Image (cartoon, coloured by chain):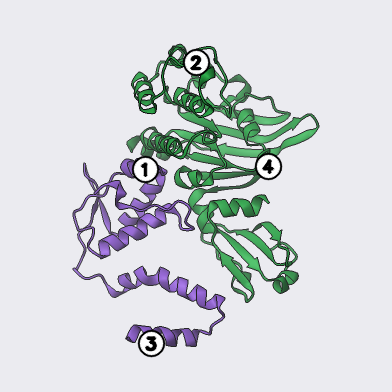
Chain colours: A purple, B green
Amino acid sequence: MDASLFQIHPAAAEPIYRQMVEQSRRMIASGQLAAGDALPSVREVAAHHAINPMTVSKAYSLLEMEGLLERHRGKGMVVAAQRGKVKSQSARLDLIDPAIQALAKQAGELELPASIVIARLKEFLEK
Amino acid sequence: MNALANSVMNSPSSAPVLEARSLLKYYGDQCVLNNVNLRIEPGSVVGLVGRNGAGKSTLIRCMLGLLTRDSGDCHVFGDPALAISDSNKARIGYVPQQPEALGWLNVKQMLDFVSGFYPRWDHAFVTSTLSRWNINGSTLLSKLSPGERQRIAVLRAMAYHPELLVLDEPAAALDPVARRELLREIAIRAADSGTTVIFSTHIVSDLERVASDIVFVHEQGILLEMPMDSIKENTLCLRLSPEISALHSGKIPGEISRRVHADKGVSIILKRDDGDVWPALCSAPGVRTETLGLEDLFIEVAQ
């Protein structure tokens, strides 16, 4: 995998390390990154995107703490073997949280009561 | 990467690379810097932003001992800024806003001449960079375009691998490709050697990429000094409707700036500490919140 794996948007409201964490989570959840795949080195990512190396280290450390990445001697960061093929429900729920938060925020701005929004959401989910 | 890890590991106990304490600077009877305190830690990449005339260049020049101050203290690698030892001077690379020195020499003569002062001069880096840039070594410095002049000045400052690199508006005369190349070089230096970098710029998207810390210089002082990530996570813009604005004319907790719009509504920039929650006002009716990118944040606080 090379450093173009990540799509970095410096001007976004979301810090770059968060963008890297979110993208990695999704790529691992979808199988785009498989167990044993090596991630580009901190230096490669920093040089390719002209971003601060500490930002990249921070993203990798967070992913390591989550258990999604493992540090391998001589190989750098590698996608960890997933325990159980299917991600737990709560893990998958975590991945959808940002979208739910955005929905909640917009509902608040439109001053829509929660019960109405939940009913509408339920309709969509059951379609 | 190891160099980076080491420099980061060592930093908490080690002295700051640059430090200003209670810095006061006047031009005539005009105060430019009023009681400024700033510490630059080893391995950080610090972006200085502020409006024209806010005092960014003056701050840089005072901290490096290139300008005398009216009171306060500045230190570079632990030396007083006005008495930096020769060995510490060789650890500093500085590119002024308008490099003009040695204009009667050609590019190659100047680089050869300067290389003699630095045992760590990287001839291979200089040669490969010049050929990549397509700059003819026999051109007189005074005949170069401003952009080329600036690139040569950056090349000169980077050629001896300084531990501290100070760039005053390096992007002003560079096109987007050259700018990106400079940022990339900064990122590589930070990764490979833990180089400490300070650069002032108006192009805030450059800072969002490569800076670890942001310093806002505003009205003779430092309005805001935060890690880049924290700026995005711990600042918030509130837009209050005119009716709500009337109820909150006093400062609210964490407020760093406030702007009144034509309709009497206000926008307020709030700052919180890591892990704190936003005040209840943020979720009140008639209040919109927005996370701002650095450019919009800068415009809100600097207006």
- Secondary structure, mark 3, is helix
Where does the image place residue B269, in percent across and percent down from the top left? Answer: 63, 59
Discs 4, 1: same chain: no
The residue type indicated by label 4 comes to Gly
Discs 4, 3: same chain: no
The residue type indicated by label 3 comes to Glu
The residue type indicated by label 2 comes to Leu
Q: Give the residue at x 64% y 39%.
A: B37
Q: Please state which of the two labelled residues, at mark 2 or mark 1, is closer to the viewer.
A: 2
Chain holding disc 1: A
**Residue A46: mark:** 1
Q: Please state which of the two labelled residues, at mark 1 or mark 3, is closer to the viewer.
A: 3
Where does the image place residue B174, in percent across and percent down from the top left? Answer: 49, 34
Q: Which residue lies under the disc numbered 3? A: A123
Discs 2, 4: same chain: yes
Is disc 2 in contact with disc 3, using a CB cutoff of under 8 Å? no
- Secondary structure, mark 4, is strand
Does residue A117 appear to the left or right of A125 in the view shown? right
- Secondary structure, mark 2, is loop
* Alpha-carbon span between mark 2 and mark 3: 73 Å
For residue A4, above or below residue B35: below
Does residue A102 appear to the left or right of B245 in the view shown? left
**Which image quarter: residue B214?**
top right
